[in-house]
Image (tube, rainbow, N blue to C red):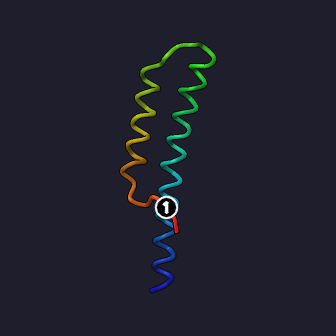
Amino acid sequence: MEDAKRRAAAEDLRRFHEKMMEFVKAWNDFTNEYVQRGTFNAKKAKLVAVAWQKLEREQSWPLPK
């Protein structure tokens, strides 16, 4: 039973990490274009918003101990 809990916790952490990395990539793409070109790319901003929404819906947010 303990192994199953550990595996489930590891899977939750992996999913959270995946969603966080998706958000970070979208944010970096958006901000790099803004800094380099000085333009606001609405499509990239939308990708940032979508990635954040996916991260918010993730049920495996690490909680402080």
Instruction: Decide: few, some or many residues near mark 1? Use Cα within 10 Å; few <14, some 14-19, many ≥20.
Output: few
Indicate whether 2 appears above or below 46: below
Residue 64 drawn at (x, y percent)? 51, 64
Q: Which residue is drawn at 53% across and 54% down?
A: 17
Seen from this angle, which residue lies furthest front?
65
For label 1, the SS is: loop
Amino acid type at circle 1 is: Pro
Indicate whether 39 appears above or below 6: above
Indicate whether 58 appears above or below 49: below
Residue 4 drawn at (x, y percent)? 46, 79
Quadrant of image for the N terminus: bottom left
Q: Which residue is drawn at 57% across and 26% down?
A: 31
Seen from this angle, which residue lies furthest bottom?
1
Number of numbered callouts drawn: 1
Q: Could you tell whether 42 is left or right of 39 in the image?
A: left
Q: Which residue is drawn at 42% across and 23% down?
A: 43
Judging by the rendered image, the residue that carries numbered circle 1 is 62
Q: Could you tell whether 56 is left or right of 33 in the image?
A: left
Residue 12 drawn at (x, y percent)? 46, 63
Indicate whether 34 appears above or below 48: above
Q: Residue at x 51, y 48 (%)?
A: 20
Seen from this angle, which residue lies furthest right?
36
Residue 5 drawn at (x, y percent)? 46, 78
